[in-house]
């Protein structure tokens, strides 16, 4: 009979543990850590939101993310759900077309640094940015009037 109160105490404590809020270490993530760890002068692309699922990074231009040329882990065309700009002087202009910078664009400012979730962003053409980027280039800010957030 003495074991019953001990078992009930352990069960009560376990139940309380699940009712307590999650610590800040487990709070919703974003791209801050990835930005801090990023190499200066590079843009980064990620398969998942919050800079998860690294697709690749590039210091230069890439007019076709799917052609196997460039610094991508695999074909990155139409896979990016978050992006990061660690550039020091230029903005990154992302396109949903390949070749000669076609198909609508959105830009990511070096001051903004990253866009953690592209689901709510659209290209200048009105197409959703999430899972639709196919190329990028570095530009000056006057070139951009459509910005990822």
Image (cartoon, rainbow, N blue to C red):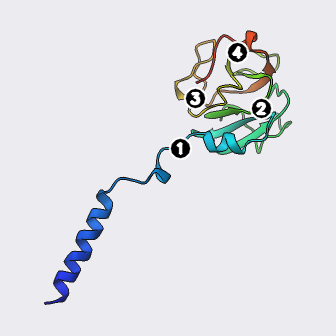
Looking at the image, residue 24 sits to the left or right of residue 135; the answer is left
The residue under label 4 is: 103
Q: Which residue is mark 1?
A: 29
Residue 145 pos. (x, y %): 66, 10
Cβ–Cβ under 8 Å for marks 3 and 1: no
Q: Secondary structure at mark 1?
A: loop
Q: Is residue 125 above or below residue 134?
A: above
Residue lying at the far left in this picture: please name it: 1
Tell me which numbered mark, 3 or 2, is placed earlier along the sequence: 2
Q: CA distance from mark 3 to mark 4?
A: 17 Å
The reply, left or right, for residue 12 in relation to residue 148 is: left
Residue in the foreground of this view, choosing between 109 and 107: 109
Q: CA distance from mark 3 to mark 2?
A: 17 Å
Q: Position of residue 98 (x, y in %)?
A: 77, 22
Q: Give the label on residue 65, or none.
A: 2
Which of discs 3 and 2 lies nearer the camera? The answer is: 3
Image quadrant assignment for residue 115: top right
């Amino acid at each position: 009979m003495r074991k019953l109160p001990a078992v009930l105490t352990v069960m009560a404590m376990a139940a309380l543990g699940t009712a307590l809020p999650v610590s800040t270490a487990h709070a919703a993530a974003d791209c801050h850590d990835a930005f801090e760890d990023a190499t200066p002068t590079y843009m980064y692309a990620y398969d998942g939101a919050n800079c998860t699922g690294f697709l690749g990074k590039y210091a230069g231009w890439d007019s076709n993310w799917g052609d196997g040329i460039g610094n991508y882990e695999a074909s990155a065309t139409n896979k990016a759900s978050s992006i990061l700009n660690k550039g020091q002087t230029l903005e990154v202009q992302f396109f949903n077309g390949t070749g000669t910078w076609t198909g609508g664009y959105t830009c990511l400012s070096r001051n903004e640094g990253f866009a953690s979730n592209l689901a709510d962003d659209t290209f200048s053409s009105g197409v959703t940015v999430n899972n639709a980027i196919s190329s990028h280039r570095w530009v000056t800010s006057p070139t951009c009037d459509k910005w990822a957030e």
